[in-house]
Amino acid sequence: MAKFSVLMSIYANDDPAHLKTAFDSILNQTLVPSQVIIVEDGPLTDDAMMVINKFKQGTLFEITIIKNEVNLGLGASLAKGVMASEYEIIVRADADDISVSNRFEKLINYFENNEDVDIVGSNIAEFEDDPKIITGKRVVPTEHKDILKFAKFRSPMNHPAVALKKTSILEVGNYSDVRNLEDYDLWLRAIAANLTMHNLSDNLVLMRTGNGMYSRRGGTKYFKSYEKIKRNAYHAGILSIFEYIASVSIIGINIAIPTSLREVVYKRILHKEGR
């Protein structure tokens, strides 16, 4: 199978124990990468550095470390990581999530059998403390035409579960520094550039919820970023004026409600709880 890179960004608030679990899930894959790119986004804790150093010891693949002197944010960090990839296919991994053992193999196999596809992802299963207890799932459309419709109102790809073609991502300008929405912004620009996207129906990532996940989807800064990427999508012809107004209005309501209520909305409506 094709050689590929895995890209992960780590910052000071990432839990070292969760980071170790994420690394272990990379080591335990049925298909291992040829390169793992780790972006240290600002100074990390001593415990996190110990986990990274232990991961570097004895691995059979290349480890590329990129150090940001200060925290630049996920989008800017991933943009650096994309540039550092030695291979065309880049698999994303988050510092607190778990890749199921055959995730990389399934993604690479799909790329090899579908050369026209630029981005491929999957569904994700969510957990809070114990990965054996699934509290929800985020199900996204599989086919490209359905992804285009879904993207008008919601992010059509699960960012921790995607794999990308480097040349395709660079063609649309790489990741941008849109805090908390760097992935949705990238998907909309990919759609505007007519890139082909697909999702596998498998749950290939176990995503850890909590830790401020629902509070990050609120606030004035989040709203401004969301409005900006939707305005850009409207000017790119992806959204009609009605779809632009509707989507911005919906997110405005979502941001205005308390975090506790927002969590209920995500768990019971937007994500299929416990299924």
Image (cartoon, grey):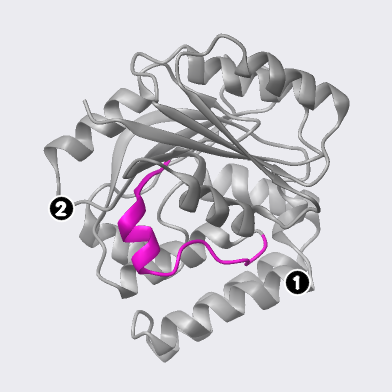
Report whether 148 appears left or right of 207.
left
At 44% across and 44% down in the image, what residue appears?
A: 85
Nearest to the observer: residue 242 or residue 203: 203
Left or right, residue 25 beside residue 168: right
Circle number at residue 66: none
In the rendered view, would you say 240 is above or below 13? below
Residue 241 place in picture, x, y as percent: 43, 90
Q: Could you tell me which residue is drawn at 26 percent across and 63 percent down?
A: 195
- The residue pinned by badge 2 equals 116
Place of residue 10 in the rendered image (x, y in percent of width and height, measured from the top left): 69, 39
User: Within the magenta stretch, is there residue 191?
Assistant: no
Question: Where is 77 relative to 17, above or below?
Answer: below
Residue 218 coordinates in the image, percent (x, y): 74, 62
Element under label 2?
Answer: loop
Could you tell me which quadrant the N terminus lies in? top left
- Reading the image, the residue beneath label 1 is 221
Query: Looking at the image, can residue 151 be seen?
Result: no
Residue located 27% across and 32% down the image: 108
Tell me, yes or no, whether the highlighted magenta stretch contains residue 171.
Answer: yes
Query: Quadrant location of residue 136?
Result: top right
Horizontal arrangement in the rendering, residue 227 relative to residue 31 (left or right): right
Query: Is disc 1 placed on a helix, strand or loop?
Result: helix
Whether residue 198 appears in this view of the structure is yes
Q: Which residue lies most toward the right here?
A: 46
- Which is more N-terminal, label 2 or label 1? 2
Question: Marks 1 and 2, Cα distance to the nearest angstrom?
Answer: 36 Å
Tag nearer the camera, 1 or 2: 2
Looking at the picture, tell me which residue is in the foreground, 239 or 27.
Answer: 27
Q: Nearer the viewer, residue 142 or 10?
A: 10
Residue at x-position 78% and y-position 45%: 212
At label 1, which amino acid type do we have? Lys
Q: Which residues are magenta?
A: 162-179
